[in-house]
């Protein structure tokens, strides 16, 4: 009776883990056994059970002691008898240890003494401790199950499949990382991306949002001509990005930071920059100041581009 709650406690941890797994990703023994928390729970519960058993044992010992004392007060005759009984009956601990080791008590060692004598060192013919024998049987049973599961029935994942699973997971994590990395772009680290994918994406964003004021080919309408060498706010990729991000509200240029993601703004800024030098159908007269590319800066930027081009393409 006393063992039943213990048993449920022992089950609780792993079952809770399994339930959680089921709720999130569908039940999967493979990932359950790979789960660090599962093993932490498991070990904790085993330790807990051991603690409970020990405490229980201590209580029993105290109880026995108290009974013995009570009897001692009652009668010295009975006391002697009881004392013998308490001593004769092995404690739970002794019984467990005996079941695990089958070790002969020292008084009976003579029975199993072999006649080997090496300079006074003698040999006992102890039987193999049951804990060890059980462990050995368990490994045999486990090896059969393992063999069937992974090599005969093929129900378990092969090493290659495990590798693929882990690579897929890593790929997913990388994607998630790049997504956040792409959104960390601001006017300080924005890059002029000349890769086709980026320019195509920038063009799409431009054609959806900007022609009403800058004309479809960037020739300019209400907004300035984006194809000439003159810029009101500067022609570097950082300047263009900044104007797109924050707008020039009092002049009618919108702030796009709430409508476009940083990566999208980087792409459209790159597209706008790529428009420079093209010939629109109806070019608006130049506004602002002449912008001359800083060769050194450009070189620096384009060296850095490759990495972030890959970032935003991914
Ligand atoms: C509602 C009209 C309007 C829309 C839509 C608009 N712009 Fe503008 N844009 C302007 C005006 C007006 C200016 C000039 C601001 C000034 O005079 O300071 C401007 C300026 C700019 C500049 C700075 C040019 C320079 O000479 O420094 C860039 C770059 C630019 N816009 C890009 C874009 C992009 C990219 C889009 C689409 C995502 C866009 N704009 C959408 C009206 C608009």
Image (spheres, rainbow, N blue to C red):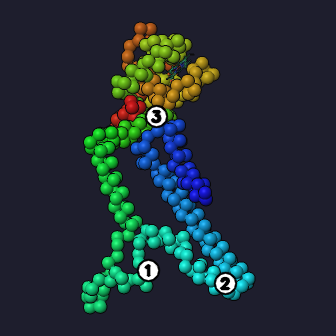
Residue at point 63% right, 86% down? 80
- Residue at the top extreme of this rendering: 281
**Looking at the picture, how far across and down is residue 275, in whole percent?**
40, 20
In the image, taking residue 264 as reference, residue 153 lies left or right, namely: left
Image-quadrant location for residue 306:
top left
Q: Which mark is residue 105?
A: 1
**Looking at the picture, how far across and down is residue 95, in whole percent?**
50, 71
Give the residue pinned by disc 2.
Answer: 79
Answer above or below: position of 150 versus 257: below
Alpha carbon of mark 2 to alpha carbon of mark 3: how far?
A: 80 Å
Q: Is residue 284 visible?
A: no
Q: Nearer the viewer, mark 1 or mark 3?
A: 1
Q: Of helix, strand and loop, which one carries label 1?
A: loop
Residue at point 42% right, 22% down? 201
Q: Which mark is residue 187?
A: none
**Looking at the picture, how far across and down is residue 48, in whole percent?**
56, 61
Alpha carbon of mark 1 to alpha carbon of mark 2: how far?
A: 26 Å
Answer above or below: position of 103 versus 249: below
Mark earlier in primary sequence (2, 3):
2
Answer above or below: position of 13 versus 215: below
Residue at point 66% right, 73% down? 63
Mark earlier in primary sequence (1, 2):
2
Q: Is residue 292 visible?
A: yes
Q: Nearer the viewer, mark 2 or mark 3?
A: 2
Image-quadrant location for residue 270:
top left
**Looking at the picture, how far across and down is residue 83, in whole percent?**
62, 82
Point out the image quarter for the C terminus: top left
């Amino acid at each position: 009776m006393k063992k039943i709650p213990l048993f449920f406690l022992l089950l609780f941890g792993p079952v809770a883990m399994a339930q959680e797994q089921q709720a999130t990703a569908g039940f999967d023994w493979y990932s359950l056994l790979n789960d660090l928390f599962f093993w932490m729970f498991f070990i904790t519960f085993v330790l807990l059970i051991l603690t409970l058993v020990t405490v229980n044992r201590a209580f029993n010992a105290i109880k026995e002691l108290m009974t013995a004392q009570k009897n001692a007060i009652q009668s010295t005759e009975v006391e002697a008898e009881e004392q013998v009984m308490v001593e004769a009956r092995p404690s739970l601990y002794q019984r467990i240890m005996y079941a695990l080791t089958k070790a002969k008590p020292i008084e009976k060692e003579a029975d199993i003494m072999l006649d080997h004598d090496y300079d006074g060192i003698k040999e006992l013919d102890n039987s193999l401790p049951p804990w060890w024998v059980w462990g050995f049987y368990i490994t045999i049973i486990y090896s059969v199950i393992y063999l069937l599961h992974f090599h005969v029935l093929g129900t378990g994942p092969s090493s290659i499949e495990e590798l693929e699973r882990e690579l897929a997971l890593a790929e997913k994590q990388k994607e998630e990382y790049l997504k956040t990395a792409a959104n960390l772009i601001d006017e300080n680290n924005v890059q002029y991306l000349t890769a086709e994918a980026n320019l195509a994406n920038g063009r799409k964003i431009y054609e959806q949002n900007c022609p009403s004021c800058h004309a479809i080919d960037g020739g300019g309408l209400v907004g300035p001509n984006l194809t000439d060498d003159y810029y009101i706010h500067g022609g570097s990729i950082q300047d263009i990005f900044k104007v797109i991000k924050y707008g020039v509200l009092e002049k009618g240029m919108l702030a796009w930071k709430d409508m476009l993601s940083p990566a999208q703004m980087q792409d459209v800024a790159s597209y706008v920059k790529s428009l420079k030098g093209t010939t629109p159908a109806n070019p608006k007269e130049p506004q602002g100041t002449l912008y001359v590319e800083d060769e050194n800066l450009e070189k620096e930027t384009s060296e850095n581009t490759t990495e972030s081009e890959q970032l935003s393409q991914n």
